[in-house]
Amino acid sequence: MAMGAPVKVVLGSIAFAIFWVLAVFPAVPFMPVGRTAGSLLGAMLMVLFRVLTPEQAYAAIDLHILGLLFGTMVVSVYLERADMFKYLGKLLAWKSKGAKDLLFRICLISAISSALFTNDTSCVVLTEFVLKIARQQNLPPHPFLLALASSANIGSSATPIGNPQNLVIAMQSKISFGRFLLGIFPAMIVGVLINALLLLCMYWKLLSAQKDEEDAAAEVVTEEDVTSHNFSPATMSHLNSMNSQELTSALEPASPNANGHANYSETLRNRGSLSESEIEKVNSSRVSNVSSDRSEHRPVEHVSWKKGSLVNGTETEHSTLEEEKGNITKTWKRTTWKLCIYLVTIGMLISLLMGLNMSWTAITAALVLVVLDFKDARPCLEKISYSLLIFFCGMFITIDGFNKTGIPSAVWEMMEPYAKIDHLSGVAVLAAVILFLSNLASNVPTVLLLGGRVAASAAAISPESEKKAWLILAWVSTVAGNLSLLGSAANLIVCEQARRAQHLGYNLSFWSHLKFGVPSTIIVTAIGLFLIRG
């Protein structure tokens, strides 16, 4: 493609530069408007500068990708409501055999869940689980947070729905879900294992350290606290100690009733701040007080029955049975509802493997779940990241305008002779270019800029080479996210979730991530390239 007019080149480059700055550094002091507004600003400037016409701008938006992204987000919301991620959290702690075993579990579960539910979703819901388990076992959280973020990025490379750049590649390349999975899955599995081994080698001494008995005794985290989880990004469930005012109110005698003793004992146990001996003392004193009160102020009454209920107003066996039946009915309804969600999700994955249209398959699954829920869908739909969808719209327009300046084509024409994938050196050069651009301009813009050009160059060799070029682009652009903390949204999500977690907060620094990210990214990327199958 020839270079555009000088004015078009300059103005298009300015619009793209503004988009790039705000996308990579969303809180720059001179314009802290964020990524979404930055992408819309870039798109608007492309139209105002007449790099694109309004019609061309609308045509640049890929509705197929937006539909697939929306559908998978809705399905993920309903899977969260069906406790899918709670069960994944339980797998992390179930019969754990120490720090090294836990690290391997985090790597595998994070990778698999990211391939099926996107890497960002997995990081959002699993970060606090990892922090809780690390606190329960008195382990340093740093290696486990790195394992979560890096494995989520590697695992998401295996499927078209694993991350946004794979969505773009799957739609542009027309590669089926099954072929995409078979092409990258071997590299993904080996990459996750190598990544885990690198973590073990780097943090072997730290993971082998004995637990501090005093620290372990000072802070107790129950199994229930680990598996119970509030998926709010800012808050988590945690143990609260009872203050003196609560303790005083707990010890005050309540009004007597037929089952007051049981209720009072249960109330004390639920508060969790009194020992068993203290509970027994309070209960015994309460029983004696109630007995003396009854003996002094009220004669013994004959309890008569009428229509299955006690005349003195206590709960009847009939009402108790009705309540139990109601609870059983609610339990069965919820179990059936959760089972339906899992079956619909499995059906969606099977349909994708069969080669059905990915966008409409995901949207159909989302709407089936909305109908099966049989209630107002607004609370679930409000959890969708509409800002991400808007960001994609602006990015599509901005990238298309930048392509029309001719700059990306001119740069690729210089690199193309050295980036042929029919020999090893060409694959290495191509991987280095993708790795560099993915960390410079983020992975999705890199895929949009290079995708068509890389595929066209490989198609001149053979159709199989074209498929392999797309898969190489998916693999390298995804694993490139592990290079630095700013390399992918999944890294930033883990960092932010860990920092904001109440009583578990941990700061994952840029340099500590870079120290592991550079060797891991280079080694995993290089080994995976040998396992990519076209």
Image (cartoon, rainbow, N blue to C red):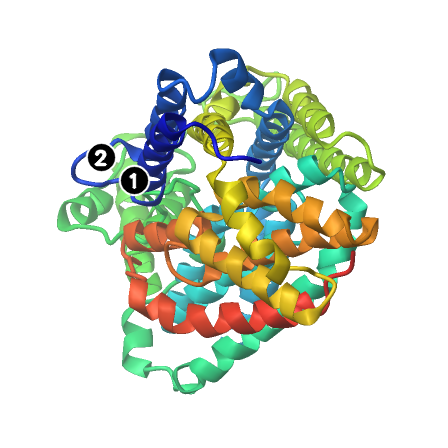
Which residue occupies 54% across, 59% down?
Answer: 479
Distance from the alpha carbon under mark 1 to that under mark 2: 6 Å
Q: Is residue 405 above or below residue 501?
A: above
Q: Could you say where residue 434 lies in the image, as x and y percent from the top left?
A: 53, 56
Q: Is residue 283 left or right of residue 341?
A: left
**Residue to which mark 1 is pinned:** 26
Nearer the observer, 263 or 523: 523
Do the CB atoms of the residues marked 1 and 2 lie less than 8 Å apart? yes
Which residue occupies 33% across, 82% down?
Answer: 213
Nearer the observer, 460 or 501: 460
The three-letter amino acid code for the residue at tag 1 is Pro
**Residue to which mark 2 is pinned:** 32
Q: Secondary structure at mark 1?
A: loop
Q: Could you say where residue 497 lies in the image, as x and y percent from the top left?
A: 36, 50
Nearer the observer, 290 or 100: 100
Q: Could you say where residue 60 lies in the image, as x and y percent from the top left?
A: 55, 23
Which residue occupies 45% across, 60% down?
Answer: 130
Which residue occupies 72% across, 40% down?
Answer: 173
Residue located farthest toward the left when viewing the structure as drawn: 244
